[in-house]
Image (tube, rainbow, N blue to C red):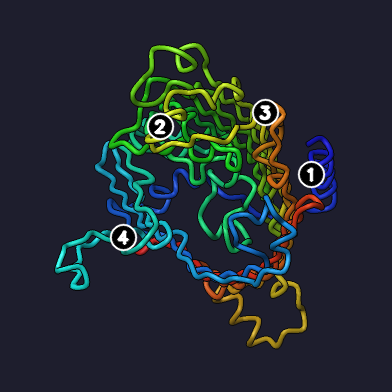
């Protein structure tokens, strides 16, 4: 962890020395619904992605437990619609507003009844389509001034770079940055209360939320599923707090610090009054640093996240994880620590070519067309510390990606990349080619 952190901060320091800031950095995506209202009482928008991947490695379930058997397995491909989102916002006046974000993940889901003639005309219910439909934001807000806003409902939890800026125009890779989306919920959204505002060069936010559920923690995803609930409601036996601070003192540069603290053991249904559930807390502590720079035809983004889980060795003995009929995880140990560090940089080559014919350069400028050549490097591990000497070495990943982002208009991007996961030597590396088309915009 220390080696990755030194490399990350050294790159950041050198970059700030050699580049002259030239434009304003981004605002928080948690405010995206109302930021684009532009004085209208009703705002409608959204974003979406269509991706194709060709993975040149095995997709067999035992590719990590028996890597030698699967090193020559054929490649596999897939199409996906990771996110299709509709924004709705309304300004009631006198500082009161409403916002919601409805998300269809991986094409949504569906169930249907069919009459099976092969089985004597019986009616059967079948799954028509996998995926999820989620209400990612749903809140009522009272704005007292730009410095003081109160929001209550289902809100985005802005821990880390990807959660705070999760729309597809805010990262170069075809899919969301892999490290943060592996160790943390992404997009992290929960029901709670948020106080936020902006004063001078600082934006600040503090949230009180329902706690995460340790029953959903895993060895390969750490706490990433801890915000999900199989029930019709989110259990709130325990609570968590999130804080975030962003600074815009340097033109074109945004620097952010964010963190989370809460208890997770016993935040489930039914609540067990005995045993591990009552004796241990399962403290979750996350600290994150991130930055975004936009200027001189460059966009550079980076983040470093580190997490701690108390009582990790006890999770295997939590009541719901012992019950084989419960909808939770049962067998795998969970790590005490997890980390993710990453940096990406893209350069707009359309802006750099000075000998374009005048008509072409004027057209590119008028349409805001851009072509970014980018590279990304990240390292992450959701199982960074062995629990009871149980190892899952394949969770330690280093990943690189290089590719292009073409922006024909401001709201649309076409992405292409080659990526490569580097695993420990006993496992097979995982190269892939990814292509995607995405948009983000407000229609009204």
Residue matched to label 3: 387
How many numbered circles does the render carry?
Answer: 4
**Label pair 4/1, CB-CB below 8 angstroms:** no
Identify the secondary structure beneath mark 2. strand
Determine the residue positioned at 76% across, 55% down. Answer: 422
Residue 358, how many percent across, how many down?
68, 86
Label 2 sits on residue = 149
For the residues carrying marks 1 and 3, which lies nearer the camera in this image?
Answer: 3
Q: In the structure shown, which secondary structural element does the residue marked by tag 1 occupy?
A: helix
At x 43% / y 60%, what residue is drawn? 106
* Distance from the alpha carbon under mark 1 to that under mark 3: 27 Å
Q: Between label 2 and label 3, give the one nearer the viewer.
A: 3
Question: Residue 353 appears in which quarter of the rendering?
Answer: bottom right
- Label 4: element kind: strand
Q: Earlier in the sequence, mark 2 or mark 4?
A: 4
Q: Who's the residue at 58% across and 69% down the image?
A: 53
First in residue order: circle 1 vs circle 2: 1
Mark carried by residue 8: 1
Q: Which of marks 4 and 1 is nearer the N terminus?
A: 1
User: Pointer 4: what residue?
Assistant: 127
Measure how far apart labels 2 and 3 are at the Cα level: 42 Å
Q: How far apart are marks 4 and 3 (CA)?
A: 37 Å
Q: Which of marks 1 and 2 is in front?
A: 1
**Secondary structure beneath disc 3?**
loop
Number of residues whose C-alpha sits closer than 10 Å to that of mark 4, classed few (under 14), some (14–19) or many (20 or more): few
Q: Mark on residue 60?
A: none
Q: Which of marks 2 and 3 is nearer the N terminus?
A: 2
Quadrant of the snapshot with the C terminus: bottom left
Is residue 360 rendered to the left or right of residue 169?
right
Q: Nearer the viewer, mark 4 or mark 1?
A: 4
């Amino acid at each position: 962890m220390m080696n990755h952190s030194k490399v990350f901060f050294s790159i950041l320091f050198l970059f700030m020395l050699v580049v002259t800031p030239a434009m304003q950095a981004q605002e928080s995506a948690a405010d995206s619904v109302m930021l684009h209202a532009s004085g209208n009482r009703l705002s409608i928008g959204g974003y979406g992605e269509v991706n194709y991947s060709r993975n040149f490695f095995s997709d067999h379930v035992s590719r990590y437990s028996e890597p030698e058997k699967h090193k020559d397995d054929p490649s596999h491909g897939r199409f996906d619609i990771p996110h299709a989102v509709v924004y709705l916002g309304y300004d009631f006046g006198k500082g009161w507003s409403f916002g919601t974000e409805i998300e269809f993940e991986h094409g949504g889901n569906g169930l249907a009844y069919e009459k099976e003639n092969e089985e004597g005309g019986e009616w059967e219910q079948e799954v028509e389509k996998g995926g999820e439909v989620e209400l990612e934001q749903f809140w009522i807000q009272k704005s007292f001034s730009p410095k003081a806003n109160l929001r209550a409902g289902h809100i985005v939890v802005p821990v880390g770079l990807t959660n705070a800026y999760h729309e597809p125009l805010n990262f170069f890779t075809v899919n969301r940055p892999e490290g943060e989306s592996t160790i943390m919920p992404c997009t992290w959204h929960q029901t709670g209360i948020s106080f936020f505002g902006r004063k001078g060069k600082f934006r600040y936010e503090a949230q009180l939320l329902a706690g995460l559920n340790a029953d959903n923690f895993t060895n390969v995803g750490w706490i990433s599923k801890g915000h999900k609930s199989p029930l019709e409601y989110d259990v709130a036996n325990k609570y968590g707090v999130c804080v975030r601070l962003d600074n815009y003192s340097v033109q074109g540069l945004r620097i952010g610090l964010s963190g989370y603290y809460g208890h997770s053991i016993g935040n489930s249904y039914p609540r067990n009054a005995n045993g591990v559930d009552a004796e241990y807390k399962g403290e979750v502590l996350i600290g994150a640093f991130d930055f975004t720079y936009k200027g001189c035809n460059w966009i550079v983004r980076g983040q470093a996240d580190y997490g701690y889980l108390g009582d990790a060795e006890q999770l295997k003995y939590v009541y719901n994880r012992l019950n084989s009929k419960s909808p939770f995880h049962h067998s795998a140990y969970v790590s005490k620590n997890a980390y993710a560090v990453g940096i990406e940089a893209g350069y707009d080559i359309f802006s750099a070519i000075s000998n374009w014919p005048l008509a072409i350069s004027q057209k590119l400028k008028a349409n805001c067309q851009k072509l970014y050549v980018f590279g990304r490097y990240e390292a992450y591990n959701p199982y960074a510390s062995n629990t009871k000497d149980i190892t899952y070495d394949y969770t330690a990943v280093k990943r690189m990606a290089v590719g292009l982002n073409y922006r024909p208009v401001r709201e649309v991007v076409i992405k292409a990349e080659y990526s490569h996961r580097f695993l420990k030597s006993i496992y097979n590396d995982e190269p892939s080619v990814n292509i995607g088309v995405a948009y983000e915009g407000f229609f009204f």
